[in-house]
Image: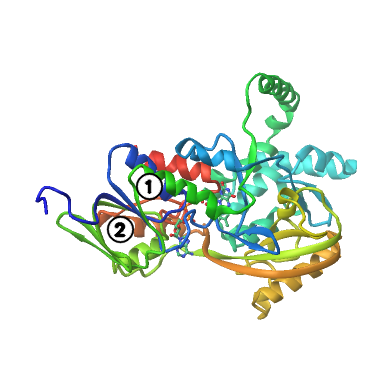
Amino acid sequence: MNPLSPPKNRYDVLVLGAGVTGLALARILSARGNSVCLMDDYASPGGNHISWTLEGMSFDVGAIFFWSDNPLFELFPGLARRCLDVRFDAQRITPDGAVRAYPFDMRAEVLDRPLRYRLRVARELAAARLRPMDRRSAEGFLRRHLGPTLTRDSGILNYMQRFYGLAPGEISFAFAESRMRWVSSRASLRARLQAPLQALLRAASRRRAARGPAPRCLVRPPEGFAAFYAEAVAGLEAAGVRTVLDAGLHGARRHADGFEVTSAAGTFSAARLISTIPMLHTANLLEIPVAAPPVSRRLTTLCCRFSGQRGFTAPVLYNFHAEGAWKRLTMQSDFYGTPGAAEYFSLEVCADGAPGAPAERGEAGPGALFAEFARTARAAGLFTGDLTLLASHDTEFAYPVYDHSAAHRRDALAARLGAEGVELAGRQGLFQYIPSSALAVRLAEAGLA
Ligand SMILES: Cc1cc2nc3c(=O)[nH]c(=O)nc-3n(C[C@H](O)[C@H](O)[C@H](O)COP(=O)(O)OP(=O)(O)OC[C@H]3O[C@@H](n4cnc5c(N)ncnc54)[C@H](O)[C@@H]3O)c2cc1C
């Protein structure tokens, strides 16, 4: 053996997790001249972007959207071509059972109502602005920007409780302020006064779009996410990145030259270890005891078939109603066609902590979640006809929970892992709020800068 050749399985950087964050990190680090090994316990790349096929239709854990200006497509140029161009549209069901625009339309939802209602909302909004903001929780943030009547009637309290598994009073104010700007921007007086100006700007931007391409909405290819991200992995391997999927990670330890990671696929070492897998898993690999890890919610995805009449038109429907543990419904067949006469959709259900969820009543399980969905959806007129549950899928660590102690728990664990020299990134790897793959890539890039 040539004594100068690097030892087998020795790299400059080991990246744990081949989700969007890990793929982006591997691409950037390798382009900067590092030897990189990307490892994941999952058998397919793409992290929690997971699809599977039933009755000829591909279903997903969650949403399937990308915008064409997503930096992921700059790192992996072949991927955008595989996607389908679609028109993005989403609606929500409100507490009064109406199907309206998502997230909400301040003008339409206030101006459509009687004068007395409009005056009450105006009075409440003016009063909320005169009072000091209640900074104890996300509820204070909502009441400040929407006032009590709109906070109640929009259904946003129901939706937040479903999404985050906590009542808005238990969600941190800092989280709402930094991550729910869509509420404040749509609700502000300035925004409403600026509406005519914005209409002009939109017209100008449409004219610009006629000259140059505006970002397009895309969905993953019909065959699902696995083939899509396999192309990214093929690109990485062509650039010299080693990828180890289905790795069976056992442990990690620091040594004089960096890190050693043991797995069913062998032992790997590197000067740097970057982890994008859930923080708790990283700590477990390093045998670091964690008394109070940050908490995440499990997501149950129900794959459903439907034939009959729909009471909504958009391919995505959010649940702002008081009933039902489901939070979002995506009509896969609106994008990928209808094999046979049926339509297909997936339902995202965060049963833990959702208001009135069957699990709370001691009836856990996908059958109970589906029965509850079918009952409430029929009552609300969303579906008239045959509804069938085909399969379900559970995703642990799907949604970080931003309660009042979340930032403290996250920072304490990140500091402990950082003291070991481990670098952290990603939605669960650093317990960051990352609602889109575009942001996952930007944060991965920024973290390396
Ligand atoms: C259900 C869901 C759907 C989403 N859909 C979209 C979308 O359509 N478009 C979009 O732009 N963004 C979407 N997002 C946002 C998403 O967070 C980012 O786009 C991006 O995928 C985050 O990538 P990541 O690599 O940081 O984390 P992840 O992909 O979540 O995970 C990275 C790695 O951590 C490990 N890991 C994660 N969870 C577990 C677990 N439970 N058990 C063991 N190991 C685990 C795996 O090794 C995984 O590869 C979605 C998020 C969720 C939760």
Q: Quadrant of the C terminus?
A: top left
Q: Which residue lies furthest to the front in this view?
A: 1
How many marks can you see?
2
Badge 1 amino acid: Glu
Q: Residue 381, position in %: x, y?
A: 86, 60
Residue appearing at x 27%, y 45% in the figure: 35
Residue 202 screen position, x and y as percent: 71, 25
Figure quadrant of the N terminus: bottom left
Left or right: where 385 falls relative to 284: right
Is disc 2 in contact with disc 1, using a CB cutoff of under 8 Å?
A: no
- Does residue 400 appear left or right of residue 419 in this picture? right
Q: Which mark is residue 72?
A: none
Colouring method of the image: rainbow
Taking the view exactly as shown, the residue that stands out farthest to the right is 114
Q: In this view of the protein, which residue sits in the foreground, 147 or 235? A: 235
Q: Position of residue 65 (x, y in %)?
A: 62, 46
In the image, residue 19 above or below residue 248: above
For numbered disc 1, what is the local secondary structure? helix
Q: Which of 448 and 65 is in front in this view?
A: 65
Q: Residue 237 carries which label?
A: 1
- In the rendered view, would you say 280 is above or below 443? below
Q: What residue type is labelled 2?
A: Leu
Q: Which residue is drawn at 85% across and 45% down?
A: 117
Above-or-below relation of 404 to 85: below
Label 2 sits on a secondary structure element that is: helix
**Residue annotated with mark 2:** 417
Give the distance between the C-alpha atoms of the residues marked 2 and 1, in whole angstroms.
Answer: 29 Å
